[in-house]
Amino acid sequence: MTEISPLESVLKRDRAIVLAGLIGVTALAWVYLYAMAAEMGGDTMAALQVRPWGGLDFLLMFLMWAVMMVAMMVPGAAPMILLFAAVNRKQRERGRPFAPVGAFVAGYIAVWSAFSAVATLSQWGLEQAALLSPMLVGASPLLGGGLLIVAGIYQWTPLKHACLKHCRSPLHFLTHGMRKGTGGAFVMGLEHGAFCVGCCWVLMGLLFVGGVMNLLWVAAIAAFVLLEKVVTHGLLAGRLSGALLVLAGLFAAFQGWG
């Protein structure tokens, strides 16, 4: 029977702690989204569409988007975060400079929070143009078709390929981009978050197709993002899905013209 070294035992313990934390944060985010979806029904969203948004409205919508991004994107970032924790534990055990995991996660979430601000403004603009229903579903087949087509085409672009390659190769990122200290970990989180936004930002636009308040649709997109990053043939799956999205978008747009 192979004896487990003290370092391996510590790494397993750290992995369990970090994983439990990520699961807890993700679960809390989903609980919050469920409660918000139940509270902010069609009547509430319709009221927002017939009156100007106030500062509190912007804040609540931004909070909804920010929590939603945590719920959708933290699971996909888990492999990177767990590997980051393992590398830092080894650095600490060897007496070398290390970077806190919490700072890395904070940097990652900060990037998606910035994206959430853009998404909030996009929602406001679409509502002002009467292009969203009270449940935040695209009210125009042309809008829905256009979003599907753009998302499908983006799946084939070099930028999408480069960002997805980064997300699927965490060891390469840590080997070549390791920084020291809390500030360095935060910057690394920002960098990784930027790649993830570059990989998934168009897919988040599809929330306006199936409904921002439709939690099954939100979960479906989150599951696709996760699978695209972790399955063996994620790039191929992304390109096939891109073709299907373009076809679905053309069909939806044709229905709109009809």
Image (cartoon, helix red, strand yellow):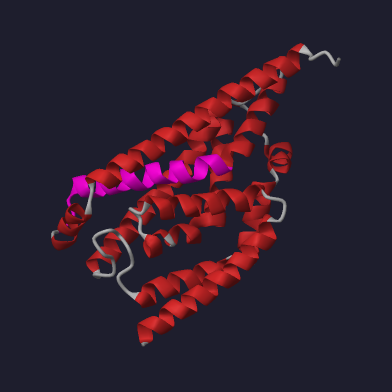
Residue at the outermost right position? 1
Residue at 57%, 55% in the rendered image: 199
Q: Dividing the picture into quarters, in which one does residue 236 lie?
A: bottom right
Instruction: Please state if 177 lies on the left or on the right of 64 as rendered.
Output: right
What quarter of the picture does the C terminus occupy?
bottom left
Q: Where is 206 relative to 79, above or below?
A: below
**In x, y percent, where is residue 145?**
43, 74
Q: Is residue 253 magenta?
A: no
Residue 58 shows in the view: yes
Residue at 21%, 56% in the rendered image: 42
Instruction: Please state if 184 lies on the left or on the right of 71 as rendered.
Output: right
Residue at the outermost bottom position? 258
Instruction: Please state if 208 lies on the left or on the right of 179 as rendered.
Output: left
Q: Where is 63 relative to 243, above or below?
A: above
Instruction: Please state if 119 lies on the left or on the right of 26 as rendered.
Output: left
- Region rendered in magenta: 52-76
Q: Does the magenta stretch include residue 61?
A: yes
**In x, y percent, where is residue 181?**
59, 26
Q: Where is 141 relative to 221, above or below?
A: below
Magenta stretch: helix, strand or loop mostly: helix
Nearest the camera: 124 or 148?
148
What quarter of the picture does the N terminus occupy?
top right
